[in-house]
Image (tube, helix red, strand yellow):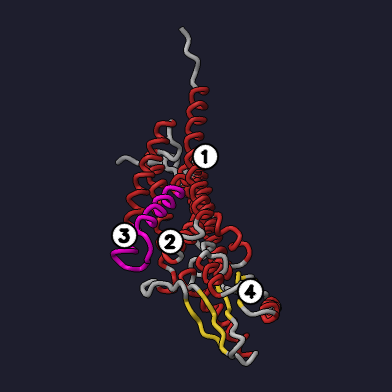
Amino acid sequence: MAHTSGTDTRTRSFLDEAKDAVTPRATALVLGVLALQLLFIASYVGALHDPKPKDVPFGVVAPGAAAGRTVDRLERLPGSPLDPRTVADEAGARRQIMNRDIDGALIVDPRGSRDTLLVASGGGTVLATTLEGITTKLEEAEGRTVRTVDIAPASAHDFDGLSSFYLVVGWCVGGYLCASILAISSGARPADPRRAAIRLIVMALVSIVGGLGGAVIVGPILGALPGSVVDLWGLGALITFSVGAATLALQGVFGIVGIGLAILLVVVAGNPSAGGAFPLPLLPPFWRAIGPALPPGAGTWAARSIAYFEGNAETASLLVLWAWAVAGTVITLLAAVLRRRRQEAELPTQVG
């Protein structure tokens, strides 16, 4: 009978098996995922665990010296929840709210003891409720009452004004997932500028279809958001493409790691700072500062403007999204050009 000697049998240690099973590259990626996980927790909990109003733009309409006294009272509230300023009349206050210059206004009635609070829950139900709580408490201390008038109310099918936020999140997810699939299927870094251009064209086509689909779902199908379907379609296409192009750019520069960086920007940093669950004035300073510059925040602001504010005050947000789209496109193509030149330079010189 054949017999195998002990010297012919090699037993591999667990450490050897682990080294083969988990390569250094896989280890680095796993550590990157762990970092994203912890950053996700820190970002979401940090932004949303303790919402407090801070310097909310707020108008005051009152006659003569009463306006100055009311503004002074509001400025001296503990924690500075409001940033009050006088407004000439109620029509002006309504106009500024619809232009999204202010988030609410107190109309003081000098002939009686009941004032009026103007809010716009379409810009965020939580913020409107917060303003109502602040002014009610203030008026009670003065022996007065207040009635609330919602001049841009959120849709009855838009609970807490969150539909616009989730719509934008869906468009963002479509953008980076499509770009990631294009990378995983044929290499994170496109082989040449032509392939990079093809990926961008595919991304644009997906964005057009996804933008239309999202607009139709939240509008005619579910009735969650009012506003122009065409305008929301254009916004959705721009959001999806801007996120997708940015993801392609990050992949073109950093390879597969670029997908993680896209998730870091859009999901970890962008979603909690977008002003969805809690509008920007209720967020901590860091998230309030970065939110408008990232696609989820710019998209949420623009979607609410289209749905509830007659399309006002969306120019800055659209410029942010266009900046992401243009920068992503240029960097994607430039990275492909440089990669091709580097490959050509590395080819051995042909003789003869």
Is residue 90 covered in magenta? no
In percent of width and height, residue 243 lies at: 46, 50
Residue drawn at x 49%, y 30% as measured from the top left: 337
The disc placed on residue 253 is 1
Amino acid at circle 2: Ile
Magenta span: predominant SS is helix
Circle 1 or circle 3, nearest the eye = 3
Q: Nearer the viewer, residue 291 or 135?
A: 135
Q: Which residue is mark 3?
A: 216
Q: Residues within 10 Å of mark 4 (few under 14, many from 20)?
A: many
Residue carrying label 4: 82
Q: Nearer the viewer, residue 45 or 7?
A: 45
Q: What is the distance, in whole Å, between disc 4 and disc 1 at their CAs?
A: 44 Å
Q: Which residue type does callout 3 highlight?
A: Val
Q: Amino acid at mark 4?
A: Leu
- The earlier-in-sequence mark between 2 and 1 is 1
Q: Which residues are magenta?
A: 214-243
- Dot 4 lies on which element? strand
Q: CA distance from mark 4 to mark 3?
A: 37 Å
Q: Is residue 277 left or right of residue 71?
A: left
| Residue on which disc 2 sits | 306
Residue 266 image offset from top left, x and y in percent: 49, 55
Q: Residue at x 49, y 18 (%)?
A: 348
Q: The disc labelled 1 sits on which kind of residue?
A: Val
Q: CA distance from mark 2 to mark 1?
A: 35 Å
The answer to whether residue 244 is visible is: yes
- Secondary structure at numbered mark 2: helix
Q: Residues within 10 Å of mark 1 (few under 14, many from 20)?
A: many
In the rendered image, the residue lying farthest to the top is: 352
**Disc nearest the viewer among 2 and 3:** 2
